[in-house]
Amino acid sequence: MKPALSSSTSSSSGILRRSRLSTYLYTLLAFIVFVAVIHGEYSIANFGRVDPIIPSPVISTTPVKKREKVVGQLPSFAVEESEEGCDIFSGKWVKDELTRPHYDESECPYIQPQLTCRAHGRPDTEYQKWRWQPHGCDIPRVRDYTHVPNRMGLMAIGISKSCRCGVGVELGTRASNASMSRDMFHGSDPGLILMINRFNATLMLESLRGKRMMFVGDSLNRGQYVSMVCLLHRFIPEDKKSMETYNNDALTVFRVKDYNATIEFYWAPFLLESNSDNAVVHRISDRIVRKGSMNKHGRHWKGVDILVFNTYLWWVTGQDMKILKGSFKDVEKEIMQMSTEDAYRMAMKSLLRWVTRNLDRERTRVFFTSMSPTHSKGDWGGEAGENCYNQTTPIADSNYWGSDSRKSIMKVIGEEFSKSEFPITFLNITQLSSYRKDAHTSIYKKQWNPLTTEQLANPASYADCIHWCLPGLQDTWNELLFAKLFHPDLI
């Protein structure tokens, strides 16, 4: 039998038990608070001007049926599932002087002189300061800590991974909100930027390690290709990157040495073989496309991990298309004429057949960029003879659909892609780009021929209302490409 405890011993034991219990409670409480903080959203101070404009578009032009999702199965490059039902192509443009542009024109040496608007005299930069904002949801953002030059002088503020805020905040500077604290951040390196990005260059480069990405199509797709290179290149040391051309400039390769990765552009304006396949000399009015000739160019696409196709404007001649049934080497050429829609359908069938037969769906992701709109007619309510020249603001009419953007072509794409055995991701940039009459190169580009007296007297007569300034609209195209690459369940 154990001896009875003294009152002092019993009291000490009770105090000890209460002390241990208090410690456990405090530990549990601290853990709960910690979890709440980790999963909560920090607020972001309102700084920089973000002015909404352009209401919801009424026209729905998404032609591709959403495939049934296989639970637990994600395509290559996908990182996680995203907000269900988020249509990132339906939204509005908002003025954003804080996070736009992504880079300065002078910072990217790879932009062709046809797209360097500021270098060729464009006086304003407003076209660079618009951000696409989907309705009712947001383009996914991811964290990225990196050293980059501070061009914006941003203030340090607290941000969570789910924050719907700007692109970057600089650490090591004063907080812009009295309720925020620098202690929220790890470290105080003034050169360390926390990037809450729609486009995360670090993630993109890591995902491309040992891989190839290729844009295939016309000069508009080349513009998107150059935009992608510009978004990445400042994160790569000068001696670790290069750009070279091959096959008489038909193939351009941007090589990232440390990642053993390439980002490439392949000139094929019709995707099929044509008499316009010369990447330098291709201004041919009498265009001929060879039927069933996808292998002519397709042999250069095999083994690519991410393919981004486009083709549209070259098909729109105002006349029926000439289709070659045999070979360009035939002395007697058999040529038939087809409507634009029928010829385009033939090309889409050929593309999908080639993709299905030659690509591994477990390895390769395939994207198709919809038609890029033009603004050469002033059909948004402009005056007679008005076009993209001297335009500095987007179109505010949510119902606007340019007369040069054929809905019949969108219908063809929808009908053919919905039958595809190989999953094709459709980048539906037409509607959102149709608002941007202000973003074209207009007269601010390299002119290949001397301007006449008549042209100089009327600048609108030689304005390029097809191509887009960089930085600018096509950076948004790549933000959307980035979102669909890593979050394929977005609509």
Image (cartoon, helix red, strand yellow):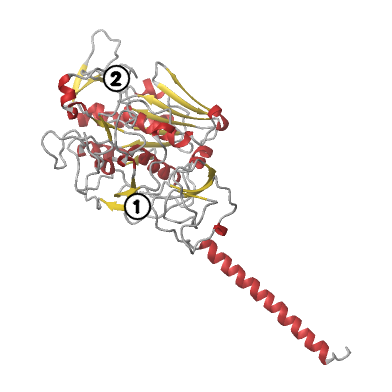
> Which residue was labeled with disc 2?
274
Image vertical order of residue 61 relative to residue 159, above or below: above
Q: Which residue occupies the foreground of this view, 185 or 29?
A: 185
Image vertical order of residue 178 relative to residue 150, above or below: below
Query: Along the horizontal axis of the image, is 438 left or right of 377?
Result: right
Circle 2/circle 1 CB separation < 8 Å? no
Residue at point 37%, 33% (across, down): 224
Residue at point 26%, 7% (across, down): 331
> Which residue was labeled with disc 1?
49
The first of marks 2 and 1 along the sequence is 1
Q: Position of residue 263 (x, y in %)?
A: 46, 30
- Which quadrant of the structure image shows residue 104? top left
Q: Position of residue 359 (x, y in %)?
A: 44, 32
Q: Amino acid at mark 1?
A: Arg
Query: Along the horizontal axis of the image, is 256 left or right of 424?
Result: right
The secondary structure type at the circle numbered 2 is loop
- Which quadrant of the structure image shows residue 231? top left
Q: Amino acid at mark 2?
A: Ser
